[in-house]
């Protein structure tokens, strides 16, 4: 439906009329997408009653139907209709029997501008199941346990049609299916609606539109493994494994940055190793260092005695 504020109607005959005299359920499903903000618009479908007077060229809101099913909104009320029309045996008149509205809030299906799959399973004993996007939103029994659809003279279905009025444009319908084979319906769903669904990552992003707090969950879920991985691959040297050379505690004394002293096989340190020059006696580096320290200490003691003037005071 492209034009707002107008009535729209379209219909098609079934190849074989569907009756409610056998145990197989009626399975009806189709897709609806509301492309703009919905003020007042229907998205329901009618299963038209098979009669000798059925003429689709004259299809209108007064054409008899057996089942009406689908979404509808008027004002602030969001509805999902399921109505069966039975014949009152006492006077031969039609009587509409509606199912209770689902407990689920339906507002998002009218406002998110996404295509949604509406599915109805209707059984001969008046049990029903309603799904949106393959999730069960309502189920129950339309009538009493003793009543059946055929016994209540629910008319056979000869055609299906859309007869709607909408204040909003760009309401799209797609992939209609009416069958009694639930397995066939599953295959049809996978090959149509299922092919258009976003991937897992896209669904996670879409979910944040109505639940912004999910961003915190995503950040924590993704960030924590990254932090743990970095901590494992590049550990802080101050807190590394105790069997490594760099391991020490905060309470330890400061350690010099220079290299450690090498101990030679003879038991002497690197500074005690001999320094040999051609034609000169062997001199140990360690001994030379100690001699220089003693000379510096003597010079310091002499300056204290002479008061720093080079002679001794009395």
Image (cartoon, rainbow, N blue to C red):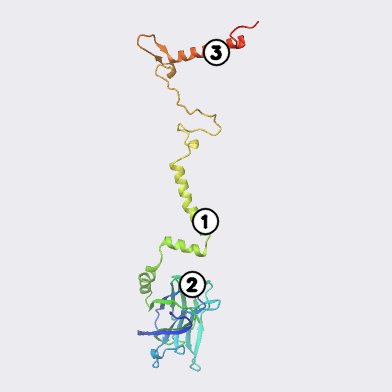
Outermost residue, right direction?
314
Residue at 46% across, 53% down: 222
Q: Quadrant of the C terminus?
A: top right
Task: Judge whether 174 appears above or below 296 on screen.
Answer: below
- The residues bearing labels 1 and 2 have C-alpha atoms spaced at a distance of 25 Å
Q: Which mark is residue 109?
A: 2
Outermost residue, bottom direction?
91
Residue at 48% across, 56% down: 218
Percent coordinates x, y for residue 202 in the rendering: 43, 62
- The residues bearing labels 3 and 1 have C-alpha atoms spaced at a distance of 69 Å
Percent coordinates x, y for residue 4 in the rendering: 47, 81
SS at circle 2:
helix
Q: Which residue is mark 3?
A: 297
Q: Is residue 300 left or right of residue 153?
A: right
- Marks 3 and 2, the one that precedes in the sequence: 2
Q: Which mark is residue 143?
A: none
Task: Judge whether 76 appears above or below 309 on screen.
Answer: below
Label 2: few (<14), some or many (≥20) within 10 Å? some
- Marks 1 and 2, the one that precedes in the sequence: 2
- The residues bearing labels 3 and 2 have C-alpha atoms spaced at a distance of 94 Å
Q: Is residue 79 left or right of residue 134?
A: right
């Amino acid at each position: 439906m492209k034009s707002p504020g107008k009535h729209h109607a379209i219909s098609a005959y079934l190849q074989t009329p569907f009756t409610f005299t056998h145990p197989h359920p009626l399975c009806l499903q189709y897709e609806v997408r509301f492309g703009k903000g919905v003020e007042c618009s229907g998205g329901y479908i009618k299963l038209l009653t098979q009669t000798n007077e059925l003429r689709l060229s004259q299809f209108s809101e007064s054409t008899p139907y057996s089942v009406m099913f689908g979404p509808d909104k008027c004002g602030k009320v969001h509805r999902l209709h399921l109505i069966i029309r039975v014949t009152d045996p006492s006077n031969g008149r039609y009587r509409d029997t509606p199912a209770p509205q689902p407990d689920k809030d339906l507002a998002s299906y009218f406002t998110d501008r996404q295509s949604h799959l509406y599915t109805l399973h209707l059984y001969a004993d008046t049990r029903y199941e309603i799904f949106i996007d393959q999730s069960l939103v309502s189920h129950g029994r339309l009538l009493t346990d003793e009543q059946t659809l055929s016994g209540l003279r629910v008319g056979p279905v000869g055609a299906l049609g859309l007869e709607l009025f909408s204040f909003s444009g760009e309401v799209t319908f797609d992939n209609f299916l009416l069958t009694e084979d639930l397995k066939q319906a599953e295959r049809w769903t996978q090959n149509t609606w299922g092919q258009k669904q976003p991937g897992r990552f896209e669904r996670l992003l879409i979910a944040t539109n109505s639940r912004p707090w999910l961003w915190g969950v995503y950040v924590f879920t993704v960030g924590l493994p990254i932090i743990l991985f970095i901590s494992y691959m590049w550990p802080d040297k101050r807190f590394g494994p105790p069997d490594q050379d760099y391991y020490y505690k905060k309470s330890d004394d400061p350690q010099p940055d220079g290299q450690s002293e090498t101990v030679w096989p003879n038991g002497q340190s690197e500074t005690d190793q001999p320094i040999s020059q051609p034609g000169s006696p062997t001199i140990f580096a360690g001994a030379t260092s100690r001699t220089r320290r003693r000379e510096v200490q003597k010079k310091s003691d002499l300056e204290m005695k002479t008061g720093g003037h080079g002679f001794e005071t009395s």
